[in-house]
Amino acid sequence: MKGANKMKTILLLENNEQQRILYKQKLSNEGYNVITANDGRTAIKKVNDYWPDIVVMNPNIPDIDIVDVIGNIIIQYKNIPIIINTGNYFYGGSAHSWQVRGVMLHSSGFYELKDTIKTLLNETKDVECNPITEEQLCGFFNSEKKNERLCA
């Protein structure tokens, strides 16, 4: 269980290198420990390795479908807050069925993202963690196709 005085950790999934660097710098300046991933496979592995308190993700990732990334994260962390940070309005309507806690549009700006992160971290009690092995990820690490379903 994480202590109340520990620095909160954010997993930032962003495939755009400039955005990733910018958000990491700004969130670090706000006092967060920021772990980054540039694709879905790396994000899923880092969830298991670092136990983040919240995940902020751009759904336009190159390697696998974002629904599979979210599903595999939720397998490991039952109630982890996930924010989709996107410029695409499509994700707003779908987010509730994915157990996503917030959808932010890039145009909303950093301050709204920062406020949403702070609000969700204050609302969320300790995140339940169920570390899993690579084999338990429904063949995820053996999947080579972006849109291949990971679980039957």
Image (cartoon, rainbow, N blue to C red):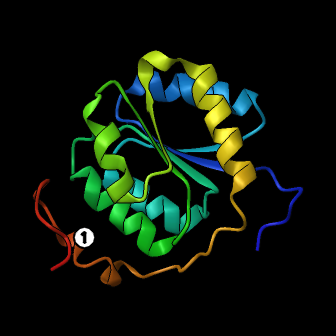
Residue shown at the point (72%, 64%) measured from the top left: 125
Quarter of the figure with the C terminus: bottom left
- Picture residue at 52% right of the left edge, 79% below the top: 131
Instruction: Judge from the rendering whether residue 80 lies leftward or rightward of residue 72; answer left or right.
Output: right
Q: Which residue lies furthest to the right in this view?
A: 5
Q: In this view, does 25 lie to the left or right of 79?
A: right
Name the residue: 22% across, 41% down. 62
List the residue tagged with mark 1.
140
Instruction: Please report the residue visible at 37 percent of the width from the left and 37 percent of the height from the top.
Output: 58
Q: Can residue 122 be seen in this view?
A: yes
Query: Is the residue marked by circle 1 packed among few (<14), some (14-19), or many (20+) residues within 10 Å?
Result: many
Look at the picture and state if 26 lies above or below 90: above
Expressed as whole percent of the image width and height from the top left, the position of residue 9 reads 67, 50
Residue 16 horizontal side relative to residue 79, left or right = left
> What kind of element bears circle 1?
helix
Q: Determine which quarter of the picture holds residue 135.
A: bottom left
Give the image location of residue 85, x and y in percent. Answer: 43, 34
